[in-house]
Image (cartoon, rainbow, N blue to C red):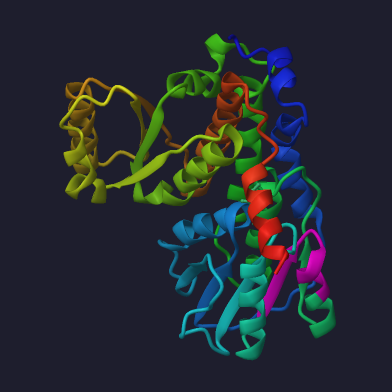
Amino acid sequence: MRLTKQEVEQVDREGLYKDYEAWPEQAESTLKSKLDLKEVDVSKIIYCGMGGSGCAGDILQDLSYTRTNIPPFYVVKGYHLPSYADKSTLVLAVSYSGQTEETLSTLKEALDRRCPIVGFSSGGELARICAEKGIPHVKLGAALTPRSALPHILYSTLIALERLGYQVVSPDEIVNSITIMRKMRESIGVESSLKDNEAKQIAQHLLNTTPIIYGPQEFKGVLIRFKNSLNENAKVHALVEILPEACHNDIEAWHQNLPNHRAILVLGKYDRRLKKRFDTLAELIERAGSEYRSIYIREPSPFESMIKLLYLLEYTTLYLAVLRGVPPAPTPNIALLKKRLSED
Ligand code: F6R
């Protein structure tokens, strides 16, 4: 299959690909939104969100790692806030639908503990509670699914944090990241042919395999997101391993023939020690009779690099779904589970 636009449309009947095509515009639209938020002075930040709404939290956490102006940043993907959440903890409660019970539970706990809170959703119960309790709420723009609304979520939370007094990335980096997506769309979008399209080629590399994704710490959030979208769009299992930690455990598993495993090696900014680790890993994968493909990401700033990687990998998951003949938009198992939970 050449993954032509027509072939994509035959499988992606709901047109999820159109959301991905619109990622630069989604990001741009958040820059224009008027956010009425006042500065706060806190000692910690907790981002609460599940699945597609949680991914932006992982990315913000990775970005904040090297920023001295950002207090410790935690991500909660579950029902409860940690014991250290108190009046000096900013809580960002993020649910695209506004209906996710884990996020609503953390929102209620944050209210009980008198944390400063900002809610983010496209509507739903989360928006209702925010209105009732007088909590600032940011309305997220329209998209077909929470995962394809990632720029709405990521850029809205970034801008909100900036207004609250915590600038995670500079305005220039934000603008540049949108330009990067615009340029990339030409080469990785549905119109671009297989021979020029890295996302289509990676999808082919991963067809009929269990992908194992390796990358450095700085891309952890983006790579978890890749795994999640491989699960939700392409409906396949996938593993994520972060270096250097994987050199202390995972690499030992490459001692046997693993013909169904395929690796993706994501390399960021040049680091001699890390390069040696990746080179040895590549050698071990080959010795085990498997194949790998490397992706090099070296944009001027960490945020621009993350956006480049994110967009490339997200398209990859869409194309893998098409190659497998699975419509990427519906997530019937997640829907079934949510229905079961709502019956109580
Ligand atoms: C992604 C997706 C799920 C949801 C998750 C939480 O497209 O559908 O991962 O993001 O179930 O739901 P929300 O985002 O509405 O809080």
292 or 69, which is in the foreground?
292
Q: Using the rendered view, name the quadrant where residue 133 is placed.
A: bottom right
Q: Is residue 60 above or below residue 324?
A: below
Is residue 300 at least partly visible in the picture?
yes
On whether residue 123 falls in the magenta region, the answer is yes
Q: Using the rendered view, name the quadrant where residue 197 is placed.
A: top right
Residue drawn at x 21%, y 22% as measured from the top left: 286
330 or 225, which is in the foreground?
330
On whether residue 41 falls in the magenta region, the answer is no
Please state if 111 lies on the left or on the right of 85 as rendered.
right
Residue drawn at x 67%, y 29% as measured from the top left: 327
Residues rendered magenta in the picture? 117-128
Where does the image place residue 114, in percent across and percent down from the top left? 64, 90
Please state if 32 lies on the left or on the right of 199 as rendered.
right
Q: Quadrant of the N terminus?
A: top right
67 or 52, which is in the foreground?
52
Q: Is residue 90 above or below residue 339?
A: below
Where does the image place residue 111, in percent across and percent down from the top left? 67, 86
Q: Is residue 82 above or below residue 314?
A: below
Please state if 90 lies on the left or on the right of 191 as rendered.
left
Q: How many discs appear?
A: 0
Q: Using the rendered view, name the quadrant where residue 3 is placed.
A: top right
Residue drawn at x 52%, y 84% as measured from the top left: 85
Residue drawn at x 46%, y 38% as measured from the top left: 237
Q: Is residue 142 above or below residue 162?
A: above
